Image (spheres, grey):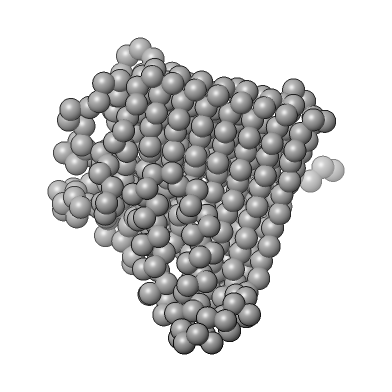
Amino acid sequence: MNAEIRTMRTQAELALLDAFANHKDRLVGARDERVAAFKKFEEAGLPHRRVEEWKYTDLRALMRDAKPLAAKPDAAAIAAAREAGRIAGVDARRIVLVNGTFVPELADTAALERGLTITSLAEALVAPGNALAGLGRTVQTNDVVVALNTAFMADGVVIRVAKDAAIERPIHIVHVFSGREAAATFTRSLVVVEPGAKLTLIESHEGAPDVDYQVNTALELVVGDGARVEHVKLGLEGSKALHLSSTMAAVGADAVLRDFAFMTGGAVCRNQLFIRLDGASTQLVVSGANLLKGRQHVDTTMLVDHAAGGCQGREKFKSVVDEQSRVVFQGKIIVRPGAQKTDARMATHALLLSEEAEADNKPELEIFADDVQCGHGATAGALDEELLFYLKARGIPAKEAEALLIQSFVGDAIENVAHEGLREALVAATAQWLQARS
């Protein structure tokens, strides 16, 4: 007799199955892609600790339920988001998504620079022609969270920068959850920067502090040969939010991509980066800073695939972990057989401010070429007592001395942000977090 083995579904998994069954006919565009993606979820379920890439962030345990899909925002929700995401000292073109929906009246799309086009994903999904050519194929991944995003994606932003166009004014995609009841949003954005073009892209996520909403957001970024792109993400979610983010970037030859993530909000956050260097002599700088307290859980999982030779990669992450919070870093660098002359360095450092704080670091290298320079490192520890004594001996109060050391520690990562206004805003945000802590 053969015993039948049945997969036990969690409450969240069952809710997602019901949601797709009830909404798949109302989700416009990309029907075949949605069905195929959801089938991956049906087969695998939510990722758990026995899945290597999710061993430190057991989503099946952390995601107790799946919230209903967010409805389109009403006038009150739109009004509440009118001033969201403004960054002092940064003149950015704001594109606002409220509860996962592109809001035209809050979008600064007048007088676009030559070579720049901005549309909503919802419009592009039903537009004739190839408005979404390449969507879902920027970087291939079997990740279940990405599959769920593909199945449920409702809206987002599609940005195209024409060849050799220099967009001096940053574009800021503002994600705001202003609902009064818990809901789930699935946003997908596609940004194509053609050869020789230049763009600074900002993403920010914020929401109500007392609502346990859920966010699954994905960004596909195509960087053409010789293009220059800086992407800065600000994670300022509400204190009860579940935030799942996936960035998939394909980078051409002689290009420069800088990516920075700054996380202070959310109850559980997972930032995934899947980056493939397709062209030779490309420069990649990936960095981030996490400032955590309470019982926050933030996971940065990154895969950098060097598929072409002569590329330089620098990855540096700094985390300040207070109270009972937990930070996770998983970084893997792959060097393909033909990617000779690769120069790649990866480092992650965690500063633990309490005995209950936790840091889990797992850097990895997979090298299939013999003429490369690659290295990785990971550290976790407390504040340097000698440096603290040095500052206090010169009359600086203990809390202020701690703040100075923490700000210096985080500032080492923030220095990787090229845009001066953004860099200053991040320094100010760090100081504000430290002030709230003291």
* Residue occupying image coordinates x 25% and y 38%: 93
- Viewer-nearest residue: 388 or 215: 388
Residue 352 lies, in percent from the top left, at 60, 72
Q: Is residue 38 left or right of residue 93?
A: right
Residue 27 position (above or below residue 429):
above
Q: Position of residue 13 (x, y in %)?
A: 53, 49
Q: Is residue 296 visible?
A: no
Quadrant hosting residue 191 = top left
Asked where in the image residue 166 lies, by quadrant, the reply is top left
Indicate the position of residue 130 as horizontal and vertical percent values. 39, 15
Q: Which one is nearer the viewer's eye here, 285 or 209?
A: 285
Residue at screen point 40% across, 24% down: 197
The image shows residue 140, relative to residue 95, as above or below, that is above
Of all residues, the one furthest to the right in this rendering is 1
Q: Is residue 254 above or below residue 349?
A: above
Q: Nearer the viewer, residue 385 or 93?
A: 385
| Residue for point 39% across, 56% down | 426
Q: Indicate the quadrant containing the N terminus: top left, top right, bottom left or bottom right.
A: top right
Q: Quadrant of residue 286?
A: top right
Whether residue 193 can be seen here: yes
